[in-house]
């Protein structure tokens, strides 16, 4: 079988996982969006869908670095909602 998904690295814990197991966050023309479907164009970052990894990404600014954009509390809130309810 050659139908494996691409591997992406979590910006929180740094683990490499199958892309479909990770939550995508995208910088779409300077608007930061949570992109569960992975279809929004733009610079993307990937995170394991759990609060530990989100907390780590906040603590070391890795999401900001990956997206090259400021990440507001509102964005973090949206991501945590996606993790908890998505
Ligand atoms: Zn992770």
Image (spheres, rainbow, N blue to C red):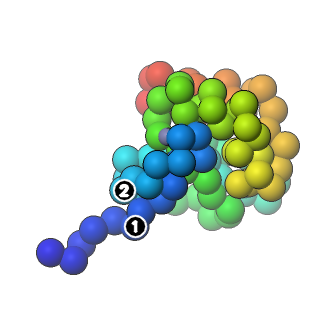
Q: Residue at x 77, y 46 (%)?
A: 64
Q: Which residue is mark 1?
A: 6
Q: Position of residue 18 (x, y in %)?
A: 36, 56
Q: Earlier in the sequence, mark 2 or mark 1?
A: 1
Q: Which mark is residue 55?
A: none
Q: Residue at x 67, y 24 (%)?
A: 77
- Residue 78, by quadrant, is top right
Q: Is mark 1 within 8 Å of ligand 1?
A: no
The one of 81 and 64 positioned closer to us in this rendering: 64
Q: Which mark is residue 18?
A: 2
> Quick check: 34 above or below 27?
above
Q: Residue furthest bottom?
A: 2
Q: Is residue 59 left or right of residue 17?
A: right
Q: Is residue 78 visible?
A: no
Q: Residue at x 41, y 63 (%)?
A: 7
Q: Secondary structure at mark 2?
A: strand
Q: Position of residue 53 (x, y in %)?
A: 55, 33
Q: Secondary structure at mark 1?
A: loop
Q: Is mark 2 within 8 Å of ligand 1?
A: no
Disc 1 crowd rating (10 Å Cα; few below 14, some 14-19, many 20+) is few
Q: Is residue 77 left or right of residue 18?
A: right
Q: Position of residue 43 (x, y in %)?
A: 68, 62
The quarter in which the C terminus is drawn is: top left
Q: Is residue 70 left or right of residue 55?
A: right
Q: Is residue 4 visible?
A: yes
The one of 10 and 41 positioned closer to us in this rendering: 10
Mark 2 and mark 1 in contact? Answer it, CB < 8 Å: yes
Q: Residue furthest left?
A: 1
Disc 2 crowd rating (10 Å Cα; few below 14, some 14-19, many 20+) is few
> Quick check: 67 above or below 56?
below
Q: Position of residue 56 (x, y in %)?
A: 63, 32
Q: Residue at x 82, y 50 (%)?
A: 69
């Amino acid at each position: 079988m050659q139908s494996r998904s691409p591997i992406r690295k979590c910006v929180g814990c740094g683990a490499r996982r199958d892309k479909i197991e990770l939550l995508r966050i995208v910088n779409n023309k300077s608007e930061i969006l949570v992109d569960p479907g992975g279809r929004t164009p733009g610079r993307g970052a990937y995170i394991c869908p759990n609060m530990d990894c989100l907390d780590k990404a906040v603590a070391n600014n890795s999401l900001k670095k990956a997206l090259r954009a400021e990440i507001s509390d509102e964005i973090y809130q949206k991501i945590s909602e996606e993790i908890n309810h998505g």
